[in-house]
Amino acid sequence: METNVLDQLRELRAQGGLEAAYDSVAALLGRAEIEDDAVALRRVGRLLAGVDPRRVLARHPATPVVTVAITGQSTVAPVVDPLTAELARHGILLRPVLGDHGAYVHDLTDPAGRFAGAGHDLALCLLDAETVLARVPEVWRPEDVERAADEALRLLADVAAAHTALSGGTLVLNTVPLPRSWSHQLVDHRSRAELGAVWRDFNSRLLRMSATAPGLVVIDLDPLVAEGGPVHDLRLAHYAGARLGTPLLAAYAREAAHLARSLRGATRKCLVLDLDHTLWDGVLAEDGPDGVAAAGTDRGEAFGAFQRVVKQLASQGVLLAVSSKNDRAEAVATLRDHPDMRLRDGDFVRIDADWEPKDGHLLDIAGHLGLGTDALVFVDDSAAECARVRRAVPEAAVVRLDDEPAAHVSRLLRDGWFDRVSLTEDDRDRNRRYRAEAGRRELRLRTGAAEDFLRDLGIEVEVGPPHRHEQARFAQLTQRTNRFNLAGRRMTEAEVSAAASGHDGELLLVVRSADRFGDSGLVGALLARRTGDALDVENVWLSCRVLARGIEQALLGHALELARASGCTEVRARYVPTPKNGRAADFYPSMGFAEVSRRSGETLFAHDLIMIPAMPAHLRTRSNPAGGGAA
């Protein structure tokens, strides 16, 4: 399988067609099932690293590109190949910028350094034991290591703050494994234990640093080392300064790729699960409810463990759905009544169980939830069903399970489809909100005209600056919103925090909504900047779940009112088309903006503030405790 993929890629490169065919690389790697083969992925990455990004974008201008600055304590170039391959698996093109050997402080903090002006989305700073141990005297005790660790943490905190101020991009650090060659220089076990405690405290404080430093992510290497083997190759560590080995860098590259994917708004939202041999052992239609198991046997217990992990994902806002070849009534009854089940029918926002093709199920689930098919992760043990879904619904992620249920959990979690930088209460509340959406759909079916539905919905809105605790949700909204993202921009939490200070004349507004079915929370955002007598709207975002309810008009209308009240004579805005935001192309004209010009793929609009559209009549306002006033 690996040889076939590599041969196809080599042939494309030999023919000069790798750039032209780059849009098919992700699907090719997905079909190849080589995602667990670090050596094969590194070879794939080496081939793809020779791709010219300009030629790819000339042929496929919609290809997402991520610029990653890479630096660290030691040799870091070996991470480029696996990172290239991991990003290619998700359809993302890597543009790497490599720092100088061991010069991470200069690379990340000097305004004239290697990364200045690189415009990187992500900076990877690979730390190793020398980050601390280079500060230890020749003859040492654990307390010397403790002092060195304190110095290293202070330096890293300063580096993170300087990088945020210079670039606004996301900085990634990592915990550092303690080498046995150092711990066992101590001949007594008590001193070794003390050193171990000092080292764990260093890593613990490093991990906690991300909670207070916007724009910082810390990857914990301990789980990767536990699964992947040795930290380094002894010879390469000594002779080449490569103190993180190839297998560990491959695992690290996978984590970094998942982070880059989430920063581009590509986090998945819904897990679509098969039932037979996926959630339980057995085939319901053949064995009956009494013949399936998720407990009580070795195999059954493995399925129960898988259900427990799925339930944990759901508790963090992952939506659950079923796609099964079974009688629906029997499937629902089994989920509801079977004593082995940790997941019940009420845990799923949609259950599609019949004898129709499963690609149709995915389209139905996406439509029912108001999601794009690129928000779905499909999990099934059938190679035929997985192949059919890959072919018919290529935007959906596909996780193929095999006949070993003990491996189900690792295969599900392997690609971090639901990873995000931080988790908000809005995320945890997603399942409740989607169940409330079912009530709204029922109301829509019962009412006639759209105006009657909106009036009966009883929508309340609140527009104003974000609370401090909402900055993570603001950033998350910009990263995940595609259909109503008027300029295609995405922001990190560090960028939101900087904009919220208002030092450069920036204005942040959010809109919160609620109705008779419940509170929807923060559903929209606007970023603008005051320039003389004009307010420049840089972007507007709105969650797709509240589109066409007048909420976007309330948000922009509030910004127009604020601009006029502050003495502005004009509000300017721009629309930048993306592959998914075409539905929003007429939003600014609908709000009284006139087109000014079109250039470089964007349309510029202006509003003279003479006639500001009234708020839609079906909306009600409420006070804004953030201090921005009511809409």
Image (cartoon, rainbow, N blue to C red):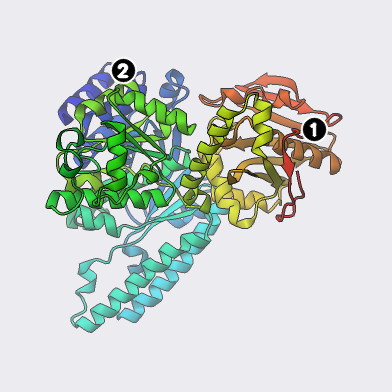
Give the foreground label among 1 and 2.
1
Q: Quadrant of residue 104?
A: bottom left
Mark 2, other Cα within 10 Å: few <14 / some 14–19 / many ≥20: few
Q: Is residue 119 visible?
A: no
Q: In the figure, is residue 511 to the left or right of 150?
A: right
Residue 477 x %, y %:
55, 42
Residue 171 x %, y %:
46, 51
**Residue at point 31%, 34% (across, down):** 329
Q: Nearer the viewer, residue 462 or 127?
A: 462
Q: Is residue 121 above or below residue 611?
A: below
The mark that comes first in sequence, 1 or 2, is 2
Q: Amino acid at mark 1?
A: Ala
Quarter of the C terminus within the rendering? top right
Element at label 1: loop
**Residue at point 33%, 21% (across, down):** 392
Q: Which residue is identified by label 1?
A: 614
Q: In the figure, is residue 271 to the left or right of 595?
A: left
Q: Amino acid at mark 2?
A: Gly
